[in-house]
Image (cartoon, rainbow, N blue to C red):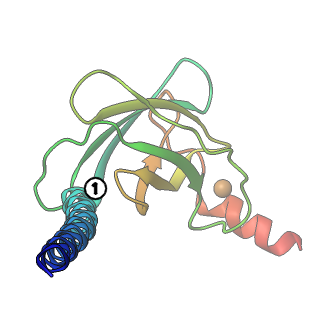
Amino acid sequence: MDHCFKGILVSGKNLENWGKARQYRYREEAMFIQRVLFAGIGLSMLLASSARAAERPKVDVECKATKDKLVYACMFAVKGRKSGNPIDGAEFTVGADMPSMPMAHNIKPITPAATGKPGMYHGNLHLEMTGEWALRMKFEKPVRDVVIKKLMFGDAAGHHAHGRMDHSKRGTKK
Ligand SMILES: [Cu+2]
């Protein structure tokens, strides 16, 4: 009787311990899930903040004729559209087209290189004629974006040799 009672006590205590162990395991699992959730929230907040930090770019372009005919040395000043802060680490290509002659030119886009000055990039554009060109700057970084800028290109002597007549001639040809 006495022995039997003790046995029940022992098994009762064992049961209690087993229950505690199970509780503990559940608590551990809950903590793990909580940690995973927090990590997920943290990561998404981080991504959201970096997306917010990546401002859309605006670009100031300055091109100068070089000694090579129709080759222009261009400087691209890339800044935040709102903040005006120079943007480093930008990745973009520059294509060129003539608004007055859609589809007539096929200029291979260039990839300007960083100059080392904050937000400044340079590249040489090889155009097919002088006149007004629309530069199409296609950004991959800091954000995907397209910036279009119209610019007049003269020859090294400063003439705008490419006039409207060339375009109308071209138009009547076909
Ligand atoms: Cu043209």
For the residue carrying disc 1, how many other residues have a C-alpha within 10 Å: few (<14), some (14-19), or many (20+)? Answer: many
Between 21 and 43, the one lying in front of the other is 21
| Amino acid on which disc 1 is placed | Lys
Between 162 and 68, the one lying in front of the other is 68
Q: Position of residue 25 (x, y in %)?
A: 25, 67
Q: Which residue is tagged 1?
A: 58
Q: Is residue 62 above or below residue 26?
A: above
Horizontally, residue 9 falls left or right of residue 127, namely left
- Which residue is at a point 16% across and 73% down the rendered structure image? 3
Give the position of the N terminus as an image quadrant. Answer: bottom left
Q: Is residue 99 above or below residue 97?
A: below
Which image quarter has ligand 1?
bottom right
Which residue, as the protein is rendered here, is positioned at the far front? 1
Q: Position of residue 80 (x, y in %)?
A: 20, 54
Disc 1 Cβ-to-ligand 1 distance below 8 Å: no
Determine if residue 38 is in view.
Answer: yes
- Which residue is at a point 19% across and 41% down the rendered structure image? 86
Q: Position of residue 146 (x, y in %)?
A: 44, 62
- Which residue is at a point 20% across and 70% down the rendered structure image? 14
Q: Is residue 120 above or below residue 14?
A: above
Horizontally, residue 14 falls left or right of residue 133, namely left
Between 42 and 158, the one lying in front of the other is 42
Q: Quadrant of residue 15?
A: bottom left
- Which residue is at a point 59% across and 68% down the rendered structure image? 100
Determine if residue 73 is in view.
Answer: no
Give the position of the C terminus as an image quadrant. Answer: bottom right
Q: Is residue 126 above or below residue 104?
A: above
